[in-house]
Image: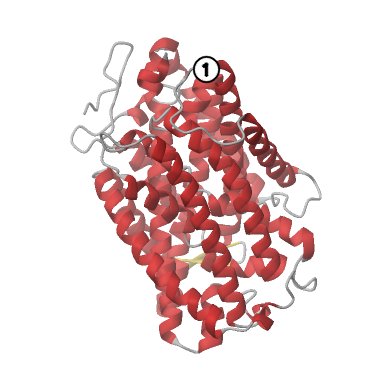
Amino acid sequence: MSDQPAGVTGQRPELKRAIGGVGFFALAFGSMIGVGWITALGGWFEQAGPLGAMAAFAAGGTLMLVIGLCYAEVTPMLPVSGGEVAYAYKAHGTRSAFVIGWFLAFGYLSVSAFEAISVGLVTSYLFPGIDVWPLYEIAGSTVYASHLVLALVSTGFITAINYYGVDIASKVQVALTALFLLCAVVFVTAGVTNGDVANLEPLFGDATLGAGGLAGALAVFVTVPFWFVGFDTIPQAAEERREGSSLRRLGIYVVLAILGSTAFYIAVILGAGMAGPWRGIVGEQLPTAAAFESAFESDTTVRLVLVAGLIGLFTSWNGFFLAGSRVLFALGRGRIVHAAFGETHPRYGTPARAVLFSGVVTFAAAWLGRGAIVAFVDVGSFCIALAFLGVALSLIRLRKAFPDLERPYRMPGGRVLAYVAAAGSVFILGVMLFPGSPSMLVWPLEWAILGVLTVTGIAFWLGAAVYRRGVSEEDRARLILEEYAD
């Protein structure tokens, strides 16, 4: 492996190939489940009620499946690191690749920041005594120095396993995902078998608490890209598959991860909703744990939920951290941004500098505290929906411009589903920007985060002009797409 920047005639930096089939599924599914189901459940109930929230996730899962089928086709077609960056470049060129890659990288790192903040939130529920050394408040929430220490240690752990080798990160992901599934089956089964359907009332929310009805379900629906994002970690790591691995199965893993995550989210909403009257947990910091605590008065059940939450937190964090660093790596290797991001470690075969940069950004964001969690969810959803739109449009273009490009997996419905995926993505983006929409980005924090992201992206683009000029488009295509450049 070379850690030198690839120039016009230089060697193309290569990543180590070490991820197998189970590793890819665990990467996607483990990234999708995360910790949102334990921190955000109260908001889902407040906005839409149990049945409204389940309907929103069912509809969102269906849309994600349509989008996922686009990924399932294009990923084995162009199995190179960076996923969406490569698709946009092949279909539309350098500028589109940068826009999609930049916002996608932030979408991934916003999830990473979400997890860095949540680790203190979940741990403090297990051990309330850790809420010490208050520093300041943001959006009405206190930021504790102890939580920042936890964020630093946890970010260091995630950074280290991604720095020292993708094989280590993959093995950790598989083990944690298996353990998470075991815990989840136990507490969801307990909620459904020992709970009461009557606890789900009112099914579609309470207007005195939140929007309720269709408006509430829509408010939950537009955040689905944030909760479901994770299946697209497979394209980011496609180049790191083991030698001889089936390309077609990459697409199948994408579909299986979406189906599995949809079932999981609906099951958790149902189990927690049946465990006890849901209005009693609205406003709780960790509503899922509160639901099982009030229903069973059992420390064991509550701790099982919290342990599962911590495990899900780390599987999601590991997956998105890996994916975000690969997007930055692809942009750097193609000389679209600073070339340092496109270098690989000579011994470990990892995008070392992109990994370290991701770690620094994650820990810096943790200083915003739990008051910024919702902002990261909303702005991250916007960025991810933009990337989904880019993939759908790229697939439409690739099918038309490169009809002979080999496709190990072909999605059913052809370009029709790609247009549906694009329309769904535009819809989500629209309701987040449309004035008066219940799902519009909140002023000023969320607009400020999006503004800083945009301005920083412009600065990165302008600052890397010398690197883009130093590489011909022919060589850039080789750096990004390898043998798929022609």
Q: Indicate the amino acid at tag 1.
A: Phe
- On screen, residue 431 versus residue 174, left or right, reads right
Q: Position of residue 203 (x, y in %)?
A: 73, 72
State whether residue 384 is above or below residue 262. above
Q: Residue at x 41, y 52 (%)?
A: 363
Q: Residue at x 49, y 57 (%)?
A: 260
State whether residue 158 is above or below residue 327. below
Residue lying farthest left? 347
Q: Which residue is mark 1?
A: 402
State whether residue 319 is above or below residue 401. below
- On screen, residue 10 versus residue 208, left or right, reads left
Q: Secondary structure at mark 1?
A: loop
Q: Position of residue 380 (x, y in %)?
A: 57, 47
- On screen, residue 44 versus residue 364, left or right, reads right
The answer to whether residue 46 is seen in the rendering is no
Q: Residue at x 56, y 20 (%)?
A: 92
Q: Position of residue 308 (x, y in %)?
A: 41, 69
Q: Position of residue 485 (x, y in %)?
A: 41, 16
477 or 5, which is in the foreground?
477
Judge the density around disc 1: few (<14), some (14-19), many (≥20) Cα neighbours within 10 Å. few
